Amino acid sequence: MDYLDKLNPQQKEAALHTEGPLLILAGAGSDKTSTMTHRIAYLIKEKGVRPYEILAVTFTNKAAKEMRDRVEALIGGNINMWILTFHSACLRVLRKHAEILGYDRDFVVYDPTDQKAAVKSIVKEMDLNDKKYTPAYFLSIISDCKEKQVDPEEFLALNGGDPKSVLIYKVYSAYEALLKKNNAMDFDDLLLNAVRVFEQDEAALLEYQERFRYIMVDEYQDTNQIQYKFVRMLAERHNNICVVGDDDQCIYQWRGADIRNILEFEKDFKNAKVVKLEQNYRSTANILAAAHSVIENNRDRKDKKLWTSAEDGSKIAYYRADDERDEARYVAQEIDRMKSSDRKYSDFAVLYRTNAQSRTFEEALSRRDIPYRVLGGLRYYDRKEVKDLISYMRLVQNPADDIALLRVINEPKRGVGAKTIEKLQALAKVRGESLLQVLADEEVVDSLSAKASAGIREMVRVITEYAAEKDNLRVSDIYDGLLVKTGYLKMLEDNNTLEAEGRIENLMEFKSVIYDYEKDDMQLSLAEFMERIALLAEVDNHDENENAVVLMTMHSAKGLEFPFVFLPGMEDGLFPGWRAFDREDGLEEERRLCYVGMTRAKERLWLTSANMRTLYGKTDLTRESQFLREVDKHLIDGDAIYEKKRDAREMMSPDGFSGEKPFNPFDQLRYAKQQTHANVNAAAVAAQLAEGMRVNHPKFGNGTVLNVNGKIIQVQFDDGSVKKLAAGMAPLSKLD
């Protein structure tokens, strides 16, 4: 048993406890994997348990492979043991018992692309508006239902008979029928149907209960309802279930994780033993103390506190920047300063709350020629929604850009098929015209389907309209107009998914890019802006194995560690995010995310905020994050954190939050729409104008009307320039 001597007393206690329920509360950096693998090795080598009788489940194939490799290294050979992800374990059950549910054993598994295609065919068959009712919209609801074991009939009963619920019921029912007809299951079905097998066939359940005398579950805080039920049913016979997790790191409730599973383990399994792994092998003492001073403010958590035998280390650095560009400059400067011959760029990580924040750091690092790579997401300018809108802007600047048009001709969907596009390209080649010129031909458009014809006409009209007025409009006005009038924004809003919300946030952040350039140059033209963006966006992506600074969200960073970590955007409304205040437990989950971010750091941790931030196209003064104010001040070095006397309203709040809801980026959508639809007001103003009147234009300033002739208004501005403006689009206002 010499191999157990490598464990600390608490790890060894957990490894040696094999009979009955066991909860291992494994804090961040406490080397839980060693505890689990040594426990499995002890069961096999010392207790004589056959590997065949042990089930270990986790969430990723990478974690499962690491666990298997380490167990085999400990016991000195290959093992016939289920060390699998939840989905893989359930798939094995179903391959043997699918007939119980009416499936053949050789059923196929539909991936997300297959699912979307299936729902798309149902939407088409039901003659629904595919812009309003997208596959993603229905699939998000169906997935949530399956996780809660709610079938179509139960969904309808729970949600009443309103038209929307009836429609979802019909699509859900048709989707289930299509899966069954094609002998297919989706990923949610793998979990759900494995539980159904156990519920419907007592012999099948007994078979696996008898086989798996010992069950181990990793990352138990991330389990959802159906995963909980799966392991609970398997463990009922022998009651030898060991779960490993940390309630302080439950950060995936938004995708179904139920923190109650770990908080209530001792209620679910009587006489459960609890072992706390509180010794941290990752971070310095100051980092751990700072992280604890934040997380201890959560009320729904197990009592524990990480400690380390390592030195105190440096204090937590804090910088209060003027704005987001100053913040990014500071981070890049610190990386430059800290980088030395014995340090790699990959030792540094910038962990932000939202993907939209990456843009300023990409730019700041590029200016200093510091290599970087974006993990858990694309580079900001490579994101689909950003590239789509840039393509629309390229078409306004250069209507002959066929590459840009081909990218967006069906964004949003306009019903133009691949064969039709091929014919249009052939016609353009014969005529020697651009695709947009061909699509402006009424005879050509009339030959298309009714849906495609209507969509193409509107797209051509919008692009042509803005192309004609591009020199008379601010870049931000053009952007707002394209975002709304092309239908792109509505497409994302109709998707009604978290992914779509994230894409909308990125588009609002792209407006911040435009504002930044307009602040520096009020006369900025579209051509100048597109040139600057093109040069910036052409920076090469870096290979994952390259020596580069890592940029990623805090959600993506869970399970990773870095010597040097920066947590930017420590402001109320950004982190904690504005959504946190819509749910009773939202602030606690955000605080857990802050704890996860802080405990990724091994040696140094930097926290930053900006006094003023332009985000989602809106500039606001900010208040330092509640989490920042919770950090023990004795552990912070750098700028002072603003403290004010708490008023009565704050004293009433257990979390100390004033009750004022932070800025919601989706408020900016309404502003964008208002700005875009301002052409109605512009036409009304134009009707009131006459020669000699004084007017203001947001781009050109004050001026005098020289002539009003139908749809054209001629204005001489105070700088001496004379402009001809479109009456229906020019954002003119009368001066008193």
Image (spheres, rainbow, N blue to C red):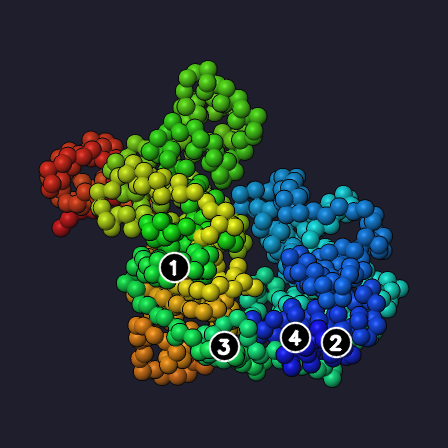
Residue 310, disc: 3
Q: Residue 533, located in which quarter of the rendered image?
A: top left
Q: Earlier in the sequence, mark 3 or mark 4?
A: 4
Q: Residues within 10 Å of mark 1 (few under 14, many from 20)?
A: some
The residue at 56%/81% (across/down) is 304
Tag 2–tag 4 contact (CB < 8 Å): no
Q: Nearer the viewer, residue 718 or 447?
A: 718
The residue where tag 2 is placed is: 1
Residue 355 visible in image: no
In this view of the protein, which residue sits in the foreground, 312 or 686? Answer: 312
Q: CA distance from mark 3 to mark 4?
A: 17 Å
Earlier in the chain: of badge 2 and badge 4, it is 2
Amino acid type at circle 3 is Ala
Q: Secondary structure at mark 4?
A: helix
Residue named by callout 1? 339
Q: Residue at x 27, y 63 (%)?
A: 322
Checking the image for residue 6, the label placed there is 4
| First in sequence: mark 4 vs mark 1 | 4
Question: Dot 2: within a 10 Å radius of its alpha carbon, few (fewer than 14), some, or many (20 or more) residues?
Answer: few
Query: x%, y% of residue 189?
Result: 72, 55
**Spatial separation of the CA atoms under disc 4 and disc 1:** 34 Å
Q: Relative to the observer, which residue lies in front, 224 or 711?
A: 224
Residue 391 spot, x, y in % from top left: 41, 37
Give residue 644's mark: none
Q: Residue at x 32, y 78 (%)?
A: 643
